[in-house]
Image (spheres, rainbow, N blue to C red):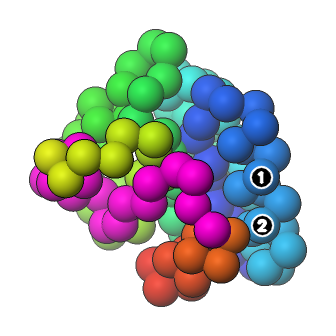
Amino acid sequence: MKTILVIDDSKADRHLMTGLLKGSGLQVATASTGKEALDWLAQNSLPHLIVMDIVMPDVSGLYLCRQLRTQPEFESTPILFCSQKNQDFDRFWALRQGANAYLVKPYSPADFVKTIRELL
């Protein structure tokens, strides 16, 4: 079974994504901060995909993405940003940091699941 790590400080967004992913037959791990995500990654096997927000309380998703991309084990792990930041610049900058895809919140459940399937 494929594991997805969801990193988002919003409990409601984590709950929504977890439900959609589990409904698609995927295993889900969650973290509410970048530090919590790094701790999880250090203690578990690599996820098949990482979904994260940009704006988080401790470190930004952009910073976390950049840090992960410098580590060889995460070079090919797909990263999807889900953020309320909806400017073209936000999407451009997220992809430039190493993300594979970008969805603007609120997104449709169908678009979310479709993007996940494409990345896996």
SS of the residue under disc 2: helix
The residue that appears at 46% across and 14% down in the rendered structure is 58
The three-letter code of the residue at mark 1 reads: Leu
Image quarter in which the N terminus is found: bottom right
Give coordinates of residue 46: x percent, y percent. 54, 58
Relative placement, left or right, of 14 versus 7 is: right
From this viewpoint, is residue 110 visible? yes
Rendered view: 25 above or below 22? below
The three-letter code of the residue at mark 2 reads: Leu
The residue that appears at 68% across and 70% down in the rendered structure is 109
Whether 97 is among the magenta residues is yes
Give coordinates of residue 119: x percent, y percent. 45, 78
Give coordinates of residue 11: x percent, y percent. 76, 32
Q: Residues within 10 Å of mark 1 (few under 14, many from 20)?
A: few
User: What label does residue 20 carry, if any?
Assistant: 2
Relative placement, left or right, of 37 versus 60 is: right
Q: Which residue is nearer to you in this view: 105 or 42?
A: 105
Q: Residues within 10 Å of mark 2 (few under 14, many from 20)?
A: some
* Disc 1 and disc 2 in contact, CB within 8 angstroms: yes
Rendered view: 82 above or below 19? above
The CA span between labels 1 and 2 is 6 Å
The residue that appears at 77% across and 52% down in the rendered structure is 16
Rendered view: 21 above or below 5? below
Q: Quadrant of residue 22?
A: bottom right
The residues colored magenta run 90-108
Whether 100 is among the magenta residues is yes
Q: Which residue is nearer to you in this view: 48 or 79?
A: 79
SS of the residue under disc 1: helix
Q: Quadrant of residue 42?
A: top right
What residue sits right under mark 1 in the picture?
16
Give coordinates of residue 14: x percent, y percent. 72, 43
From this viewpoint, is residue 98 visible? no
